[in-house]
Image: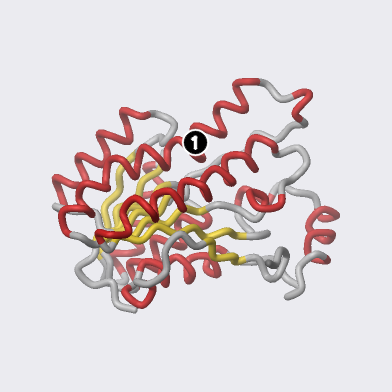
């Protein structure tokens, strides 16, 4: 699955799933543009990629800020000439029961997890249309498929990404641009590290494979969907959940 001569943009790339995706895409030969708020972590990632013989560039970007998205995409396109692959990975949680959830926490999660994906797509789609090739990959969640108490904002944002994925697949399919989603289940990341041991043990009981996933498990799926081997797959949600949700 060679991605030589491809340019990929990964949001939320400073840690967890985004970081693993950037490393995997670079390993497959893509030039990787990594974007997140933490410039220090991004620079460490770029060093790791270049030390392994890859090519990468870091851009500090808060996906909750529309103007930062526009400026970053414009600068990346100016530097590399194109963006072939977009991985919309950036995401946050602000958990609370609906009856107690503040409007600011609802808006923050929807803006970061869903609206940013729409804005990033809007900025890079022109490049993909001109060359009649592109891969848009949205990182959704098993909880966008099955819901989760205390995460109405998060589940809504991730379910919205699935709808966005299918709509985009229909809009741009005729130009050989695919749009798919990857739906991770319980993955060991900084976002889940703060959960209690009891919660983690109960979660594992729901997973037929008997273990939590790794960021690399998700990255392998993303790299496949970015490749030519996945050229006849679009509008699809690829579950990477150990069997936690089937069907």
Q: Is residue 196 above or below residue 241?
A: above
Q: Is residue 36 above or below residue 68?
A: below
Given residues 52 and 113, the one toward you in this image is: 113
Q: Is residue 83 left or right of residue 210?
A: left
Picture residue at 29% right of the left edge, 77% below the top: 2
Q: Residues within 10 Å of mark 1 (few under 14, many from 20)?
A: many
Q: Which residue is mark 1?
A: 112
Given residues 193 and 65, the one toward you in this image is: 65
Given residues 7 and 53, the one toward you in this image is: 7
The answer to whether one can see residue 233 in this image is yes
Given residues 114 and 21, the one toward you in this image is: 114
**Position in image of residue 117 (x %, y %):** 42, 42
Picture residue at 30% right of the left edge, 43% below the top: 59
**Position in image of residue 20 (x %, y %):** 46, 62
Q: How is the image coloured?
A: secondary structure
The answer to whether one can see residue 44 in this image is no
**Position in image of residue 171 (x %, y %):** 34, 50
**Position in image of residue 172 (x %, y %):** 31, 54
Q: Quadrant of residue 169?
A: bottom left
- Residue furthest top as drawn: 103
Q: Is residue 246 left or right of residue 161?
A: right
Q: Is residue 84 above or below residue 221?
A: above
Q: Is residue 192 left or right of residue 50?
A: right
Picture residue at 41% right of the left edge, 36% below the top: 63
Disc 1 on helix, strand or loop? helix
How many numbered discs sit on the rendered protein?
A: 1
Query: For the C terminus, which image quadrant?
Result: bottom right
Picture residue at 65% right of the left edge, 65% below the top: 241
Q: Quadrant of residue 1?
A: bottom left
């Amino acid at each position: 699955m060679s991605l030589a001569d491809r340019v990929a943009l990964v949001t939320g790339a400073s840690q967890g799933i985004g970081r693993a995706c950037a490393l995997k895409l670079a390993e497959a030969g893509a030039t990787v543009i990594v974007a997140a708020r933490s410039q220090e972590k991004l620079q460490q990632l770029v060093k790791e990629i270049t030390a392994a013989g890859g090519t990468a560039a870091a851009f500090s970007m808060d996906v909750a800020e529309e103007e930062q998205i526009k400026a970053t995409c414009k600068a990346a396109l100016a530097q590399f000439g194109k963006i072939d692959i977009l991985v919309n990975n950036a995401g946050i949680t602000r958990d609370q029961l609906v009856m107690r959830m503040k409007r600011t926490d609802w808006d923050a999660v929807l803006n970061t997890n869903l609206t940013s994906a729409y804005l990033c797509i809007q900025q890079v789609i022109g490049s993909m249309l001109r060359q009649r090739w592109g891969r848009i990959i949205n990182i959704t969640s098993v909880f966008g498929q099955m819901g989760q108490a205390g995460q109405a904002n998060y589940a809504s944002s991730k379910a919205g990404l699935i709808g966005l994925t299918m709509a985009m697949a229909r809009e741009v399919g005729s130009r050989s641009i695919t749009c798919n989603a990857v739906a991770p289940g319980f993955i060991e990341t900084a976002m889940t590290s703060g959960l209690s041991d009891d919660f983690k043990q109960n979660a594992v009981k729901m997973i037929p494979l008997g273990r939590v996933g790794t960021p690399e498990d998700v990255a392998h799926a993303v790299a496949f969907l970015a490749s030519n081997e996945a050229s006849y797959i679009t509008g699809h949600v690829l579950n990477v959940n150990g069997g936690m949700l089937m069907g």
